[in-house]
Image: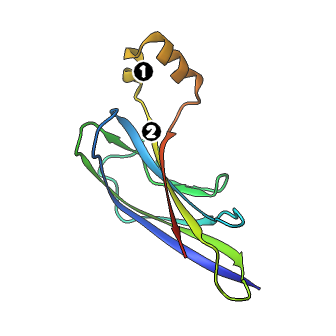
């Protein structure tokens, strides 16, 4: 026998507390069982309203890494707030223990970042070479995990 869980994650707003770099940011969300490492499957992505400014990287479900990602947004200064207003549904199936006490599930949030092309041209040559050797696009720069259940 298995238990089926649905996790609804809504991200309403991003507030930049301390600016390290100007650039394009996004947030990726995953969930998985701590005991079995079974990943939750993203099944739905919801946008509550139309974006004021179209995103360079629209959000959505990624079946390859069992995650969903909100649309990217550009951060220019410290204390800047950005309305995200996007949600995702993750489904997780776990075996039912006899005592009905489930092992914890981890909900993981990753902050993704992409330095704009203009900023890459201003970097020192060695830094620019390292940045160009990485695949283009958003890269993880921070990760926070929360246990529940």
Pointer 1 or 2: first along the chain? 2
Q: How crowded is mark 2: few (under 14 residues within 10 Å), some or many (20 or more)?
A: many
Q: How crowded is mark 1: few (under 14 residues within 10 Å), some or many (20 or more)?
A: some
**Residue on which disc 2 sits:** 113
Q: Which residue is drawn at 64% across and 74% down?
A: 103
Please determine whether, in this image, residue 81 is positioned above or below residue 120: below
Please determine whether, in this image, residue 72 is positioned above or below residue 146: above
Instruction: Determine whether label 1 and label 2 are within 8 Å by CB.
Output: no
Tell me the quarter of the image containing the N terminus.
Answer: bottom right
Could you tell me which secondary element the residue under label 2 belongs to?
strand
Tell me the quarter of the image containing the C terminus.
Answer: bottom right
Please determine whether, in this image, residue 32 is positioned above or below residue 97: above
Could you tell me which secondary element the residue under label 1 belongs to?
helix
**Residue on which disc 1 sits:** 120
Q: Residue 56 location in percent, x, y?
A: 43, 41
Residue lying farthest to the top in this orientation: 125
């Amino acid at each position: 026998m298995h238990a089926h869980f649905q996790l609804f994650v809504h991200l309403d707003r991003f507030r930049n507390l301390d600016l390290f770099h100007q650039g394009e940011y996004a947030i990726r969300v995953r969930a998985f069982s701590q005991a079995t490492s079974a990943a939750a499957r993203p099944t739905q992505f919801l946008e509550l309203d139309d974006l004021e400014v179209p995103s360079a990287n629209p959000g959505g479900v990624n079946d390859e890494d069992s995650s969903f990602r909100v649309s990217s947004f550009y951060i220019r200064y410290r204390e800047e707030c950005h309305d995200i207003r996007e949600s995702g549904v993750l489904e997780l199936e776990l075996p039912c223990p006899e005592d009905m006490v489930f092992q914890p599930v981890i909900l993981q949030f990753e902050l993704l970042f992409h330095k704009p092309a203009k900023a890459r041209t201003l970097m020192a040559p060695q830094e620019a070479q390292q940045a160009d050797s990485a695949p283009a696009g958003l890269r993880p720069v921070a990760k926070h995990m929360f246990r529940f259940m």
